[in-house]
Image (spheres, grey):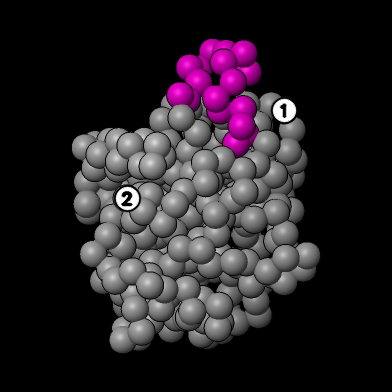
Amino acid sequence: MRFLLPLALLAASLAAQPLRIIAIGAHPDDCDIKFGGTAVMLAKMGHQVKFVSVTNGDAGHHEMGGQVLANRRRAEAKESARRLGIAEYEVMENHDGELTPSLDVRRQIIRAIRQWKADIVITHRTNDYHPDHRNTGILIQDAAYMVQVPNVVSDTPPLRRNPVFLYFSDYFQRPNPFRPDIVIDIADAFEQKLNGLDAHVSQFYEWLPWVSGVSAEVPKDPAARKDWLRQQRTNARLNDSTKAAFEKWYGPNKTPKYLEAFEICEYGRQPTEAEIRQLFPMLKTMPKK
């Protein structure tokens, strides 16, 4: 019975002050894609959400690049943050397509997590098609313990409590498929998430359609192209494990439409189901399995 008191104190602490969440993606749009709807919901509840892009996105286009593209993408990220209603969107000055899990970048990550005093850190898994995604995942894994070590990056005070580290969802199967430990119904926030994605014009209407060979499909009219983007961002690939996890958190009588899912990293603090409901308050009133 001795473990009940700390859990109760933890729940009271989390309830008494806003949560601090930092989502760390490789590029200026990754967090928006994987976490945008949940971020909208948390921000509306009064919690502090920050997005970080570890690279400046200066390679992600077919017609421009370098600092001109980096500046454009930073402006798009700033506009996305405004539309999503989150507190901050930081874009670091590391080159797109050249990210490595170096000690220098690890220090940047440790500082960012400490300065935000994060309760939750969310990032990519390390098995991913893009080297920047993989290396961002490695960087966060390498920082997961070090954020508490005073003699590492000693210019920034260490965290006194380890955050919960989570992974964004993906569809890669080897060596291990994504495990949807936490599933959030973002139906009520989907349109606002879409507004955030729409701010990344260089990506969703130019670069990504070009690299996928579907540029001709993108309408010229802003309203029409946003409708096109809406069709691209449905749960067409919702798999059985995600459906089962959705039922665990929301019960059997609700049909999933727009979801975001997260896997609990084995590094960092391991939350109980009760703590997950504190860290994601939109789950608090949902039926328990």
Graded by Cα atoms within 10 Å as few (under 14), some (14 to 19) or many (20 or more), the crowding at tag 2 reads many
Task: Tell me the number on the disc at residue 278.
Answer: 2
In the shown orientation, is residue 198 left or right of residue 124? left
Which residue is rendered at x = 77% and y = 68% of the image? 174
Which residue is rendered at x = 66% and y = 32% of the image? 105
Graded by Cα atoms within 10 Å as few (under 14), some (14 to 19) or many (20 or more), the crowding at tag 1 reads few
Nearest to the observer: residue 81 or residue 14: 14
Residue 227 quadrant: bottom left
x and y percentages locating residue 221 in the rendered image: 36, 78
Q: Is residue 256 magenta?
A: no
Up/down of 224 relative to 190, above or below:
below
The amino acid pointed to by label 1 is Leu
Residue 230 quadrant: bottom left
Q: Is residue 157 magenta?
A: yes
The amino acid pointed to by label 2 is Gln
Up/down of 174 relative to 46, above or below:
below
In this view, which residue lies farthest toward the right? 175
Q: Which residues are magenta?
A: 143-160
Q: Say whether residue 35 is visible.
A: yes
In the shown orientation, is residue 198 left or right of residue 28? left
Nearest to the observer: residue 40 or residue 8: 8
Which residue is disc 1 drawn over?
Answer: 103
Indicate which disc, 1 or 2, sits on the residue closer to the N terminus: 1
Task: Tell me the number on the disc at residue 211.
Answer: none
